[in-house]
């Protein structure tokens, strides 16, 4: 096995752990902030949504940085498009991969595809997790409280 394969697999494994822990810790912080008095429910939900969106954007950029870094190694693969690819194109590829949109106008070749395939799975899971948190917070803070007699 080529050393670059090991580097890509190990980097991906460690990176997924970091991203999931980051997501968890930020969600714990969000949940605590939602319990603080002083903000009306509408403001809380809007702030939560902007926070979740910002968190996903950060995670997309982190995956893009990992891909960009790993592409520096010989044998890691390449990113292809019908134009010269720069870092922002890698961010775009990361975004369409993370969200599982996958337009196909920019694509990877070689072992680096392992990172991007894993990113699609992680992105799908984290977006789903975000939807679950939003639903739970809406139940707690948005919907009118019912009396136990209803």
Image: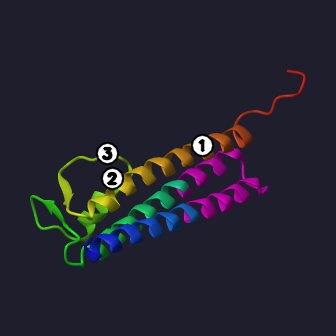
Instruction: Please tell me whether mark 2 sits on a helix, a strand or a loop.
Output: helix
From the viewer's perspective, is 67 left or right of 75? right
Whether pointer 1 and pointer 3 mark residues with C-beta atoms closer than 8 Å, the reply is no
Residue 36 versus residue 67 in the image, above or below: above
Q: Name the residue rendered at 20%, 63% in the picture.
A: 110
Q: Name the residue rendered at 9%, 58% in the picture.
A: 82
Residue stretch rendered in magenta on the structure: 22-51
Query: Dot 1 corresponds to which residue?
Result: 132
Membership of 26 in magenta stretch: yes
Name the spot of residue 79 as percent of width and height, x first: 19, 64
Name the spot of residue 83 as percent of width and height, x first: 10, 63
Residue 133 versus residue 76 in the image, above or below: above
Query: Which circle marks residue 97 in the picture?
Result: 2
Name the spot of residue 39 as percent of width and height, x first: 72, 53
Membership of 82 in magenta stretch: no
Instruction: Please tell me whether mark 3 sits on a helix, a strand or a loop.
Output: loop
Of callouts 1 and 3, which one flags the residue occurring earlier in the amino acid sequence? 3
């Amino acid at each position: 096995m080529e050393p670059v394969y090991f580097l890509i697999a190990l980097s991906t494994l460690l990176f997924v752990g970091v991203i999931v822990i980051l997501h968890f810790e930020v969600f714990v912080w969000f949940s605590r902030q939602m319990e603080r008095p002083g903000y009306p429910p509408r403001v809380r939900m809007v702030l939560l949504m902007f926070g979740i969106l910002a968190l996903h954007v950060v995670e997309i950029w982190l995956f893009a940085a990992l891909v960009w870094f790993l592409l520096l190694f010989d044998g890691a693969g390449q990113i292809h498009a019908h134009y010269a690819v720069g870092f922002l194109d890698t961010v775009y590829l990361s975004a369409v991969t993370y969200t599982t949109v996958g337009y196909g106008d920019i694509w990877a070749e070689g072992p680096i595809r392992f990172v991007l395939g894993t990113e699609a799975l992680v992105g799908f899971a984290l977006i789903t997790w975000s939807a679950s948190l939003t639903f739970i917070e809406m139940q707690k803070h948005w919907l009118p409280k019912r009396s136990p007699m209803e």
